[in-house]
Amino acid sequence: MGNRFKVACLQLNSGQSVKKNLNQTLKFLTRAVKLNANLILTPEITNIVSLNREHLVKETYSEKKDPCLYMVKEFAKNNSVWIILGSIIIKDNNNNLFNRSYLISNKGVIISKYDKIHMFDAIISSKEFYKESSIFTAGKKVKIGQTPWGKVGLSICYDMRFPELYRSQVAGGAKIISIPSAFTVTTGKAHWHTLLKARAIESGCYVFAPAQCGQNTPKRKTYGHSLIVSPYGKILKEKMSGTGLITCKINMDEVDNIRKNMPSYQSKLLKRTISQQYIIHDRI
């Protein structure tokens, strides 16, 4: 496929109904294909948004039975398109919940999957607080997946505040970073653009950040502002509000050009500190 492709980032308003969320996702996946996207990304918690653990256990599925994952795999295969299912909530046989991202090939095959490592435990105000560690089981592995255009470092939302994650992915060969999110409005206004631009600049990677937006539940509102950022930190496309998508033509030669002219990407220190945790999955 060469070094050039078209990426699409979906901006969704997922809620507490898995069925409605699936219909919304399929609608915008179809629109992205009509716009000739080769790689499509969805936001964090595409399949369901809830802070109630009991509700999530009741409404979610195991990986083998999850309707959202099945639908996206079939869609990828039938439309010959690569998809990063930003994340869906999956449960295991013991009702442990995982916030999991999937890289899916144009054959409908899972190439890599990643469980969110950093849990968002934060007090935003007296009325707004989060404790993901009481809901989800945290991941332990840094993941990189292979695509026709280069290796992709997988991450989810709050991970973006931990630059060491992305440095280890760069050391492992990543040239694209996926950061699907469901950012709060308060922290989004303060940090969203700055953090994503910083991750692109320090890693010399394209950053694709599809986002949740609007009032997802009575108690949760997300920031939107899906972004596509160049390896030099330039915002190439942005979807400020509302559901929909953004697309952008990507030239992977830009990654090599920027890294060639910036010594920080060639440092011996970076190469010596490659994390042994990262795993490249060609097929699962």
Image (cartoon, rainbow, N blue to C red):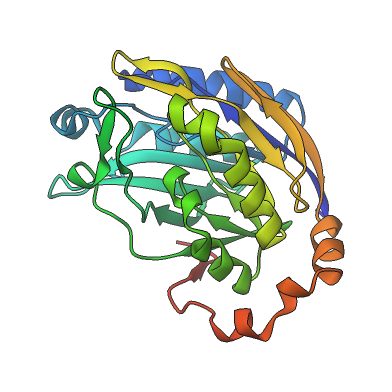
Residue 90 left/right relative to 205: left
Q: Nearer the viewer, residue 119 or 55?
A: 119
Work out whether residue 280 can be spotted: yes
Residue 185 versus residue 268 in the image, above or below: above
Residue 232 left/right relative to 54: right
- Residue 59: percent from left, percent from top: 22, 28
Numbered-mark total: 0
Q: Tell me what residue is drawn at x 84 percent, y 56 percent.
A: 254
Residue 102 versus residue 57 in the image, above or below: below
Q: Nearer the viewer, residue 214 or 80?
A: 214
Work out whether residue 41 can be spotted: no
Residue 280 versus residue 254 in the image, above or below: below
Quadrant where the C terminus sits is: bottom left
Q: Tell me what residue is drawn at x 49 percent, y 63 percent.
A: 165
Instruction: Tell me where residue 68 sits by quadrant.
Output: top left
Q: Tell me what residue is drawn at x 62 percent, y 83 percent.
A: 269
Instruction: Tell me where residue 175 sits by quadrant.
Output: bottom right
Residue 12 left/right relative to 9: left
- Residue 189: percent from left, percent from top: 53, 28
- Residue 47: percent from left, percent from top: 38, 29
Q: Tell me what residue is drawn at x 78 percent, y 52 percent.
A: 232
- Which residue, as the protein is rendered here, is positioned at the far front? 126
- Residue 251: percent from left, percent from top: 84, 50
